[in-house]
Amino acid sequence: MNPLSSVRRVLSGSRSGTGPGASAVESPASLVGPAASPPNPPDRDELQSRLTPLQYVVTQEAGTERPFTGEYWNNHADGVYRCVVCHEPLFDAATKFYSGTGWPSFSDVAQGGTVDTRTDRSHFMTRTEVRCRNCGAHLGHLFPDGPRPTGMRYCINSAALDFERRAAE
Ligand SMILES: [Zn+2]
């Protein structure tokens, strides 16, 4: 079985999408040549080979890992959490707190963190989605019920993160 589709099945609990060929791209006549443009951009292919199926579905298809299953929800080490796709710094262990949700939770973005938020109306809910500003990877959601001083809770998938332990100086 295709590992990507099995992850999608587990995450969504439903059969996936539109099937092959739904997004056929018409290329301009001027570009017709021996090398047809691939159905997926090359960076997606690179990502599929580099990321785990779960990392791919979470970051590229806005999936959500199951709570208490990720690598970092219970990680207490000091360091920086980077985007698993583009390696930009996103969150710092200094703002990580125990939320009880089973996902890594942060009260703020890291200094210089490349994080964007936007309104997400999928799944019949209105939520604030958190994405990597640099590469657009889906990271998780933002809720206004975090600890002081920010009052914010960035609820982030472990699968979207790459933890880099801070070196002792
Ligand atoms: Zn990124």
Image: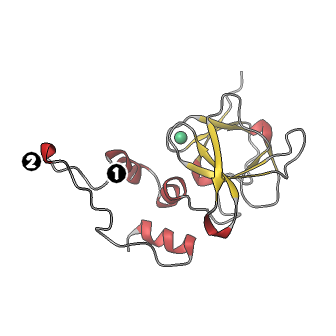
Front residue of 5/35: it is 35
Quadrant where the N terminus is found in the figure: bottom left
The answer to which of 83 and 146 lies nearer the viewer is 146
Q: Which residue is mark 1?
A: 45
Q: Identify the residue at image location x=27%, y=61%.
A: 24
Residue 56 position in % (x across, y down): 48, 56
Q: At label 2, which amino acid type do we have?
A: Pro
Label 1's element?
helix
* CB-based contact (under 8 Å), mark 2 and mark 1: no
Residue that sits furthest to the top in the current view: 169
Quarter of the view holding residue 165: top right
Residue 123 position (above or below residue 79): below
Rendered location of residue 156, percent (x, y) = 67, 52
Residue furthest to the front: 29
- Ligand 1 within 8 A of label 2's CB? no
**Res 157 visible:** no
Return the disc, 2 or 1, that comes first in the chain's sequence.
Answer: 2
Position of residue 93 relative to residue 40, above or below, is above
* Residue at 71% over, 21% down: 169
Residue appearing at x 89%, y 38% in the figure: 149
Seen in the image, is 17 located left or right of residue 107?
Answer: left
Query: Where residue 52 appears, x then y in whole percent?
Result: 47, 56
- The colour scheme used here is secondary structure
Query: Which residue is at the front of the view, 92 or 21?
Result: 21
Instruction: Check disc 1 and give the amino acid type.
Output: Asp
Name the residue tied to disc 2: 34
Res 7 visible: yes
Q: Which circle, 2 or 1, is nearer the viewer?
A: 2
Mark 2 and mark 1: Cα distance apart in space: 20 Å
